[in-house]
Amino acid sequence: MGFSSVVVEAIIMVSAVIAASVLASAIVNKVNVMNNVFQTVLKSKNEALLTKVVITYAAYDDSLGLFRVYATNIGSYAVTAMDKIDIYFGEYGHATLYTYDRDGVLTRGEWSYVEPEGNEPNVWEPGETIEFLIYNSTAVNMPYYVKIVLPTGSYADEVFTDIRA
């Protein structure tokens, strides 16, 4: 009876150690997953806070029938997904979402952009001013409203009373 109870106690002890190890491993794994999620969210929010643009000037180009809006990246991060930018344009209080011109033929309700020569394509670097071309789909009464929303959620908006070039 003495020997068998020692064996049983040893088996129970080994089982308890194995169970504790499995539990500890699962907890450590979940803590690592939570840490990775937290770091990803923190990096994303940090980038959003440090990405900032301002609209510096706007003008209507009679010859091309489009609006030229100039905006400068005054943040610390480059904007790399230029085609993911949302632009709202129109009469103040009635602006609509314009789509990015993907086919290279600017039509009504679309926007495109022009980068300064010598810069890396499709990257809006800090300090760089981009010219957005907005092809209006309807008549726009004053005041005009422009809102540029970056993929990070950061945005710039401006109201213009007269933007004739």
Image (cartoon, rainbow, N blue to C red):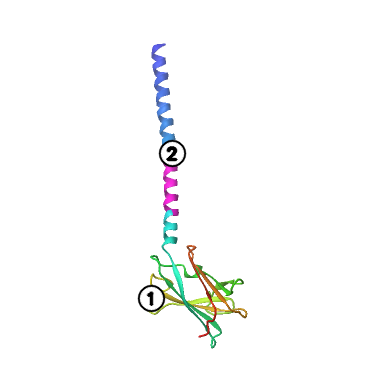
Q: Mark 1 points at which residue?
A: 119
Q: What element carries label 1?
A: loop
The quarter of the rendered structure image containing the N terminus is: top left
Seen at 44% across and 31% down, the residue is 19
Question: Residue 154: within the magenta?
Answer: no
Residue 18, percent from left and from top: 41, 30
Q: Residue 59 carries which label?
A: none
Residue at the bottom extreme? 63
**The residue under label 2 is which amino acid type?**
Ile
Against 6, residue 124 (above or below) is below
Tell me the crowding category of disc 1: few under 14, some 14 to 19, or many 20 or more residues within 10 angstroms, Cα based: few
Q: What element carries label 2?
A: helix
Q: Which SS does the magenta portion mostly show?
A: helix
Against 160, residue 64 (above or below) is below
How many numbered circles are shown?
2
Tell me the crowding category of disc 2: few under 14, some 14 to 19, or many 20 or more residues within 10 angstroms, Cα based: few
Residue 149, percent from left and from top: 51, 67
Residue 126 lies in what quarter of the image?
bottom left
Residue 143, percent from left and from top: 57, 77
Instruction: Please state the extent of the stretch shown in magenta in the rendering.
Output: 28-41
Q: Mark 2 points at which residue?
A: 27
Q: Nearer the viewer, residue 113 or 68?
A: 68
| Of callouts 2 and 1, the N-terminal one | 2
Seen at 42% across and 75% down, the residue is 129
Against 66, residue 33 (above or below) is above
Q: Nearer the viewer, residue 3 or 142?
A: 142
Q: Is 109 left, or right, of 31 in this rendering?
A: right
